[in-house]
């Protein structure tokens, strides 16, 4: 690897993104220098998509590399394709059939079907599922960039290995692990097992130091209090770089987060949970305003989301808020990647009389606690603290339950409504 | 009514009638013909293995515990045999014994059983408690259902040894077999033949999974689980239960044009999201088997909740056989059934990708990255400590 000054004549356009973002610059350096794998860990709202789109553009336009991007859902693929096109790069979205142009796709993105996949299409974006069906011998790129890589299993990453000699994985290690429908007990305790999130498994299997590990150090979404709250869920250090922002209601400024306890007697489907969450959403919309460096303005439905762990809960919420179609209502899984100024989140343990792996999953809790830019209200079951304490008495080694208790205590003690 | 309340209703009915209440019309397991039931017990740190084929019983302890299986000539020579156990605990015990005595003829068979137990719909291993819980509800708490003794009591089985497991397995496998289940069991034979072939070639059954083995092993497990769940929705009682969880959505057709129709759902809970491919049938959830008019294929175009808390689901590209439904007709929707042939193609594709030369992420060769000159501005920015 050698450092080379840009040529004097006809200097290429040098994008500024990497100058302001050392992590992007390091990822670019590693890929241009020929590192075979780069893993970029990121906290919520730290600019993953910004990094991956600018990395793709610079590898393609400056280094002349052929680049493929793998997203994990169709919506993510569309978003990444649009945002990569905004960098000025030539971008194609790979789809099964070209007949229907997906709604919302930028006119700057070329649609390409599998049969027409060939070199020279610019940066090609597709879902992992689509890439896994591309021919192994007729299409190969220099670099594969994987977005939301913690949602991709190591097994599927291995399937993508036919695509490129170099790979960059960008993702949030605190989010929900990949959805795996099959039994995985055979590989319990194997950090490089096929069901593991691809970045952590790739690092675990890297005995000879071929994987460059980087991290995005700042969250631009979360305020300092929320950053402190979720930091125990991460093994990487990070800090808040969010510009000042808060929500006010008729009583004054709201804290970054607060908790509302409700009495739940009917399990996860108890209407009391959805009712409390919907009431809080309506209160925000009735008198809330968002205050940023740009000034103050009323909180609108597009600024608000309400998330819950169970489909039954989101059904009740959707019914209760049917007159507010612009409020995002969805499961916590669906909310991955979402950002709103104000979020109301149903605590994952609400309605549980005993803990379950689903309810204590720290990834799900992390997503619920990290979608807001200015304010979060957590609707929690007033029995949850006792349920966690009882579980810890019986299973003191249960770290997920212990972390849940710590989070709930912090939410309750630090997030008291002023 | 929520899925939880529906489940509670079944338990209350079972308690009232003092008999198990069926969760499914069909049997979710093949009858355990020619099966071998095994129990393990630990006393003073020593494992005892008891086995029964319904006619005779063998029991051994300590170092020779697996002799109980050897007495039934359990080996990879010949056809495979169904193992009947209470739960995974017994398999764990057997596997620990097999690892300590790998030379025993039954040792590799135990390893094969342990693998197949991860595949729902497989007939290689019958887990009595899990199979009984999937088929019946008892008038007890869910926790009590995890105890074998509870099931033996409710089914009036007095035996305590491994033959009791055979009786319970037969009792919970009564009735017609779930359509498609025999095909799932066919995978057992293919797996057995491949396993025996590898052993004959000299492969050690204790060898840890390679990356390729593990990836394909996860794929077969996931496919088996998804196929079984899909087949289950073809059972009338299971479909009714699923309608309370949103996996089956029943309603009335409110508009219908060529290839497109809208359903006003009876309940607002639905797991059928825009973009999902769906199938369906005319009538209620319980009509899944008997209905003649079928929605072969369609795609959810929109799912919107009204201010009256009613859910309207629009379906496009609808293909009905033999004739389309009209306004006012009743319909039930579900996710399009899993196609086992498509699953097979996907596994073959994954296998081929893992075996492709140059797939360095799968451990095939070393990559040859492009090593270019790094522009100075990138070098400087990468060195920035800010």
Image (cartoon, coloured by chain):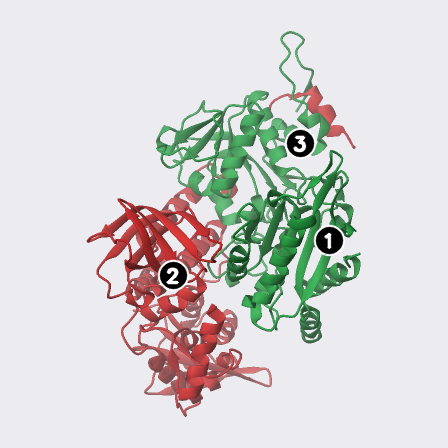
Coordinates of residue B38 in the picture (x, y in percent): 42, 80
Spatial CA distance of label 2 from label 3 is 46 Å
In the picture, which chain is red? B
Label 2 Cα crowd, 10 Å radius (few <14 / some 14-19 / many 20+): many
Above or below for B205 versus A66: below
Chain of the residue where label 3 is placed in the rendered structure: A
User: Looking at the image, do the residues carrying marks 2 and 3 touch, with CB atoms under 8 Å apart?
Assistant: no
Is residue B50 visible in the rendered structure shown here?
no
In the picture, which chain is green? A
- SS at badge 3: helix
- SS at badge 1: strand
Question: Mark 2, mark 3: which one is toward the viewer?
Answer: 2
Chain of the residue where label 2 is placed in the rendered structure: B
Q: Dot 2 corresponds to which residue?
A: B248
View extreme (left): residue = B322
Is B153 positioned to the left or the right of A298 in the image?
Answer: left
């Amino acid at each position: 690897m050698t450092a080379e000054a840009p040529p004097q004549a006809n200097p290429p356009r040098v994008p500024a993104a990497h100058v302001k973002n050392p992590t992007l610059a390091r990822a670019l350096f590693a890929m241009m220098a020929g590192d075979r794998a780069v893993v970029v860990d990121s906290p919520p709202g730290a600019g993953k998509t910004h990094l991956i789109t600018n990395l793709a553009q610079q590898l393609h336009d400056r280094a002349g590399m052929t680049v493929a991007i793998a997203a994990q859902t169709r919506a993510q693929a569309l978003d990444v394709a649009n945002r990569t096109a905004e960098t000025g790069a030539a971008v194609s979205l790979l789809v099964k059939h070209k007949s229907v142009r997906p709604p919302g796709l930028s006119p700057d993105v070329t649609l390409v079907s599998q049969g027409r996949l060939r070199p020279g299409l610019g940066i090609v974006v597709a879902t992992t599922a689509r890439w896994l069906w591309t021919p192994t011998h007729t299409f190969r790129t220099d670099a594969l960039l994987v977005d939301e890589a913690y949602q991709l299993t190591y097994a599927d990453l291995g399937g993508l290995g036919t695509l490129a000699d170099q790979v960059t994985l960008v993702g949030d290690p605190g989010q929900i692990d990949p959805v795996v429908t099959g039994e995985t007990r055979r590989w319990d305790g194997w950090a490089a097992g096929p069901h593991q999130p691809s970045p952590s498994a790739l690092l675990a299997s890297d005995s000879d130091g071929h994987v460059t590990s980087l991290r995005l150090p700042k969250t631009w979404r979360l305020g300092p209090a929320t950053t402190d709250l979720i930091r125990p869920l991460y093994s990487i250090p990070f800090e808040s770089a969010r510009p000042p922002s808060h929500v006010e209601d008729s009583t004054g400024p709201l804290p970054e987060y607060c908790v509302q306890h409700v009495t739940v007697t009917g399990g996860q489907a108890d209407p009391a949970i959805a009712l409390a969450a919907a009431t809080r959403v309506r209160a925000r919309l009735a008198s809330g305003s968002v205050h940023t460096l740009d000034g103050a303005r009323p909180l609108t439905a597009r600024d608000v989301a309400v998330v819950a762990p169970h489909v039954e809960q989101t059904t009740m919420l959707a019914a209760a808020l049917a007159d507010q179609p612009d409020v995002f209502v969805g499961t916590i899984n669906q909310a991955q990647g979402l950002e709103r100024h104000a979020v109301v989140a149903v605590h994952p343990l609400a309605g549980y009389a005993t803990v379950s792996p689903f309810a204590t999953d720290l990834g799900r809790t992390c997503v619920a606690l990290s979608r807001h830019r200015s304010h979060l209200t957590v609707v929690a079951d007033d029995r949850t603290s006792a349920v966690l304490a009882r579980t810890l008495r019986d299973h003191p080694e249960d770290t997920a339950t212990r972390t849940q208790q710590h989070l709930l205590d912090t939410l309750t003690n630090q997030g008291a409504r002023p | 009514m929520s899925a939880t309340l529906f489940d509670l209703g079944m338990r209350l009915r079972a308690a009232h009638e003092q008999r198990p209440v069926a969760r499914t019309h069909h049997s979710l397991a093949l009858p355990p013909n020619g099966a071998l039931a095994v129990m393990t017990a630990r006393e003073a740190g020593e494992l005892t293995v008891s086995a029964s084929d319904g006619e005779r019983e063998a029991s051994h302890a300590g170092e020779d515990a697996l002799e109980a299986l050897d007495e039934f000539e359990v080996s990879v020579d010949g056809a495979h045999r169904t193992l009947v156990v209470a739960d995974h605990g017994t398999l764990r015990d057997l596997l620990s014994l097999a690892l300590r005595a790998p030379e025993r003829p039954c040792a590799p068979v135990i390893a094969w059983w342990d693998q197949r137990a991860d595949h729902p719909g497989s007939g290689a291993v019958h887990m009595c408690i899990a199979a009984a819980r999937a088929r019946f509800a008892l008038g007890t708490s869910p926790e009590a259902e995890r105890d074998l003794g509870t099931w033996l009591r409710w089914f009036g089985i007095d035996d305590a040894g491994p033959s009791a497991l055979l009786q319970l397995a037969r009792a919970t496998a009564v009735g017609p077999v779930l359509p498609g289940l025999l095909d799932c069991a066919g995978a057992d034979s293919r797996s057995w033949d491949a396993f025996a072939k590898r052993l004959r070639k000299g492969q050690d059954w204790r060898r840890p999974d390679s990356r390729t083995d593990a990836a394909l092993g996860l794929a077969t497990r996931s496919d088996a689980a998804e196929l079984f769940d899909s087949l289950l929705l073809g059972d009338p009682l299971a479909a009714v239960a699923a309608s309370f969880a949103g996996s089956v959505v029943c309603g009335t057709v409110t508009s219908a044009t060529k290839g497109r129709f809208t359903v006003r759902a009876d309940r607002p809970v639905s797991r059928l999201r825009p973009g999902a491919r769906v199938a369906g049938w005319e009538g209620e959830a319980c009509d899944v088997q008997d209905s003649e008019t079928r929605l072969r294929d369609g795609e959810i175009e929109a799912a919107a909740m009204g201010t009256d808390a009613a859910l309207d689901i629009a379906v496009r590209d609808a293909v009905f056989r033999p004739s389309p439904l009209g306004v006012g007709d009743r319909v039930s929707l579900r996710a399009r059934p899993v196609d086992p042939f498509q699953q097979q193609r996907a596994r073959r594709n994954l296998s081929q990708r893992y075996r492709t030369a140059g797939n360095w992420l799968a451990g095939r060769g070393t990559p040859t990255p492009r090593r270019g000159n790094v522009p100075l501005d990138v070098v400087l920015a990468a060195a920035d400590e800010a």
